[in-house]
Amino acid sequence: MTAHASRGPAIEFDHVTFCLNGRPLLDDFTLAVEHGGSLVLLGRSGSGKTTTLKLINGLRLPTQGDVRVNGLSTAQWEAIQLRRNIGYVIQEGGLFPHFTIERNIAIVPHIEGWDRERVRARVRDLLAMVGLDAELASRYPSELSGGQRQRVGVARALAADPPILILDEPFGALDPITRSEMQKEFRALQQELRKTVVFVTHDLREGLLLGDRIALVEDGRLIVNSTPPEFLRSQEPMVRAYIDAFSEPSDLRRSA
Amino acid sequence: MNFWHFVITNRQQMLDLTLEHVTLAGVSTLIAATVGIPLGILITRIPQLSKVVLGSANVIQTIPSLALFGFLLPAPWVGERAGRLAILVLALYGLLPLIRNTYTGIRNVDPTVVEAGRAMGLTERQLLFQVELPLASGVILAGLRIAAVVSIGLATIAAAIGAGGLGEFIFRGLAMVDDRVILAGAVPAALLALATDTLLGWLERRLNSIRTNA
């Protein structure tokens, strides 16, 4: 906390409660992500992980409390500006089916008014960065495999070089081998780019691999928020249950 | 004198009436699209209006067309010229398929794609023009196709109020009890409808093949 105290955290949840139709989806959430840090939100389906992400980019606003990005409340940010500072990756990429890969990746640079040559060059760089062949640029999403689409999704999120990246189970729909590849590549990419990352998953192994902090969310409440080794040592029953569900604990410790 | 003989001797008039028919149907469909598509978009943005708007368009559709011509005859400006009146009535009938298809087309766009666009910082306007409308265009075009075909069919009735078009032959043939004259109006009208249907259907399939297979 102290290292970046002067700048403050990149993302901050300050006693955030979010209700939908009177039902609380998030209950008194408090956490912070430092600049360049990566937080993994771990939890079951419906636990409130996705809602947490949508509170960061202002797709949802808190019912109570405050979500701050770079020190400014998301309610005060100009929504469009806020979102262009945050790359968003979702499962299956969420690509625009009527745009070519190039247009998909370049959508934010395009609306930000970059000139054509700069956009072209950026798309080439990004395709290389996520390990895709440059000739895919002119294809449509339906012509790509699930893994390729997911890579395009990551490239699109990185296009305008946003300082923050939020990812909602990005590798959830992939086969185990592709998923494992993508996880390793994403980790390498993260070490190179040093974005502030919030990553949602229900896969403990993925969480241990990609997060420098892991937050367990259950039923809209934050159960623990700790480093991966602390997480594995935790005696919190909910955490134990999660770890037990993922087979050999010794095996997991190695991957952390 | 058989049918073909009639066609050949009256070809100039047939051509004139066909052109008149195309103008009636074309202009009215254009007006229906100009009003219907924005209305359809509007009710996706203000859902409280959707019941009223779709309901009204539905009610118009249930009024028999001949009666609607009669109702609007005393209306100022449009009632003065038969052509204006015919175009107004035909446009009113074209509204429902256009409003409804625009509305359902946009509503059926994959919400994750729309939210992805919103999350990337697209404005509502950019979302509409770059994501929602292009993805709904196949369904909207299907609405246009229905509106155009219905309009070509209904335009034959416009002759009853003196607006011209191929209905002239049909009504004249009925009065003269002469099949050849009826056919001289009915056959080109049917061919027009078929051609329009085929052309717009082809366009629709082309659009859908690019956009729906994600």
Image (spheres, coloured by chain):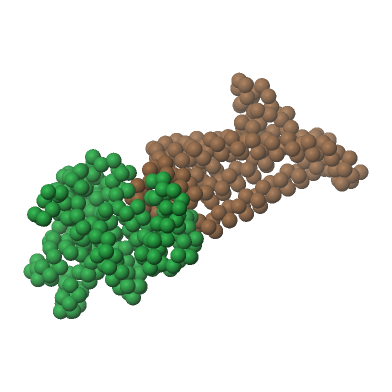
From the viewer's side, name the closer residue of A5 and A16.
A5
Relative vertical location of residue A157 with respect to residue A22 in this rendering, above or below: below
Left or right of A148? Residue A225 is: left
Corner quadrant of residue B163 = top right
Q: Tell me which chain appears green.
A: A
Quadrant position of residue B175: top right
- Vertical side of A84 occupied by A150: above or below: below
For the point 60% across and 42% down, the residue is B147
- B113 is higher (above) or lower (below) than A209: above
Residue B205 coordinates in the image, percent (x, y): 58, 56
Q: Which residue reaches farthest right?
A: B1
In the rendered image, the vertical position of residue B84 relative to residue A241, given as above or below: above
In this image, B17 relative to A21: left or right?
right
Which tint was used for chain B? brown
Residue B173: x %, y % from top left: 81, 37
User: What x and y, as percent, mark residue B190?
Assistant: 72, 46
**Quadrant placement of the C terminus of chain A:** bottom left
Place of residue B21 in the rendered image (x, y in percent of width and height, measured from the top left)? 72, 37
Q: Is residue A87 visible?
A: yes
Q: In screen coordinates, is B32 left or right of A111?
A: right
Left or right, B57 with reference to B192: left
**Is residue B59 in view?**
no
Q: Nearer the viewer, residue B66 or A43?
A: A43
**Residue occupying the point 36% across, 65% down:** A130
- Return the residue nearer the eye: A68 or B4: A68
Quarter of the image for residue A148 reads bottom left
In the image shown, does B180 or B50 lie closer to the viewer? B50
Q: In which quadrant is the N terminus of chain A drawn?
A: bottom left
